[in-house]
């Protein structure tokens, strides 16, 4: 099985859209096109200093699908890359909603 890195992206959202960095790395099997490895991460050292600033992440390092959130890693039951990517996007959107509420409260206090 020959694999190659298919996606290697770094996005730097504006402060309104989360600040920090969104990292996407995806490797595929060259013959079948199936995803063999992945790393999806929201990195923001201003929010979380440990774990190299990784606030949220999903990967299958060591052959196990798992989720990282604020330094805690847990195995997940999702098995398809599509479902894992959708979970990452939902969780990132939830983090953004919380950040916006906190910023709005702070703004209202000044």
Image (spheres, rainbow, N blue to C red):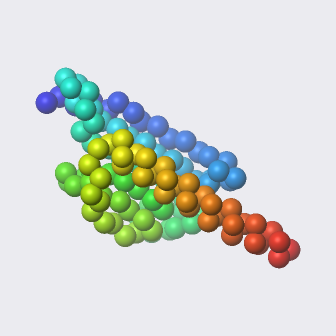
Q: Is residue 42 left or right of residue 38?
A: right
Residue at 33% x, 66% y: name it: 73
Residue at 76% x, 72% y: name it: 106
Residue at 38% x, 62% y: name it: 68
Q: Nearer the viewer, residue 45 or 78?
A: 78
| Residue 42: percent from left, percent from top | 49, 54
Name of the residue lying farthest toward the right: 110
Q: Nearer the viewer, residue 25 or 66?
A: 66
Q: Is residue 12 left or right of residue 4?
A: right
Picture quadrant where residue 98 is located: bottom right
Name of the residue lying farthest toward the bottom: 109
- Quadrant position of the N terminus in the picture: top left
Q: Is residue 5 left or right of residue 22?
A: left
Name of the residue lying farthest toward the left: 1
Residue at 48% x, 62% y: name it: 55
Q: Is residue 105 above or below residue 56?
A: below
| Residue 44: percent from left, percent from top | 54, 59
| Residue 84: percent from left, percent from top | 36, 49
């Amino acid at each position: 099985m020959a694999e190659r890195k298919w996606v290697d992206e770094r996005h730097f959202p504006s402060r309104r859209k989360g600040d920090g960095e969104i990292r996407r790395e995806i490797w595929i099997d060259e013959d079948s096109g199936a995803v063999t490895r992945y790393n999806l991460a929201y990195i923001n050292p201003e929010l979380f200093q440990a774990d190299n600033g990784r606030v949220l992440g999903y990967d299958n390092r060591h052959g196990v699908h798992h989720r990282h959130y604020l330094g805690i890693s847990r195995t997940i039951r999702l098995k398809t890359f599509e479902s894992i990517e959708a979970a990452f996007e939902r969780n990132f959107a939830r983090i953004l909603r919380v950040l916006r509420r906190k910023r709005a409260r702070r703004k209202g206090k000044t």
